[in-house]
Amino acid sequence: MEFKEVIKNRYSCKKYDSKKVSKEQLEAILEAGRLAPTAKNLQEQHIYVVESEEVLAKIDKHTPCRYGAPTVLVVAFDKNNVFTYPGDKRDSGVEDAAIVATHLILAAADEGVDSCWLNYFDPDALAKELGLPENEEILMLLDLGYAADGAGPLPNHDSRKPLAETVSYL
């Protein structure tokens, strides 16, 4: 699929059928995340693939916003392996994980797999529930699967502000 079509047509799917993502598609999606750029090439991301009913149920205890996808990617990063920017107010952890997550989302769309970025949960409580290492912080969850009948983009999906309202030239 052409990149312009991927970014135009991709939407946050909020209703999935039970069909699982193929191993080949999942690997292509994960590879796109692996190739994402990170500050100083630290590659501090860690992606957890969740497909078991047991672990999906643990995630469901922490968010009402998982929409029945058969696969969830937990996107985390190593808080101890980040680049701290000048001024010491920010580091690369969240932004690098967000770049990785964006690559995952766009690769999923390119593979014909629907997705939804989920962030309505307490990351510390979920990390503890999942038994993640203390040095890792969860940025987001990514539902992956195939849209169920009747699923589709929100009615305002194609509504975008003009560039003149969101871009300024200095």
Image: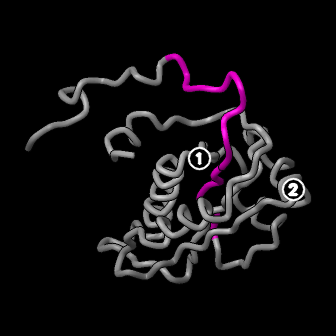
* Callouts 1 and 2 close, C-beta under 8 Å: no
For residue 22, the mark is none
Mark 1 vs mark 2, foreground winner is 1
Query: Which residue sits furthest left?
Result: 170
Tell me residue 23's x, y (percent): 67, 64
Residue type marked 1 = Val
**Vertical placement of 77 versus 1: above or below?**
below
What residue is pinned by disc 2? 58
Q: Nearer the viewer, residue 103 or 79?
A: 103
Q: Nearer the viewer, residue 24 or 73?
A: 24
Give the residue drawn at x 39%, y 73%: 38
Give the residue drawn at x 55%, y 26%: 153
Give the residue drawn at x 73%, y 37%: 16
Tell me residue 117's x, y (percent): 59, 46
What residue is pinned by disc 1? 113
Q: Nearer the viewer, residue 46 or 146?
A: 146
Tell me residue 62's x, y (percent): 81, 49
Q: Secondary structure at mark 1?
A: loop
Q: Is residue 39 left or right of residue 53?
A: left
First in sequence: mark 1 vs mark 2: 2
Q: Residues within 10 Å of mark 1 (few under 14, many from 20)?
A: many
Tell me residue 11's x, y (percent): 52, 35
- The answer to which image quadrant residue 21 occupies is bottom right
Image label count: 2
Query: Which residue sits furthest right?
Result: 54
Q: Quadrant of the C terminus?
A: top left
Q: Which residues are magenta?
A: 137-155
Give the residue drawn at x 63%, y 47%: 119
Q: Secondary structure at mark 2?
A: helix
Residue type marked 2 = Lys
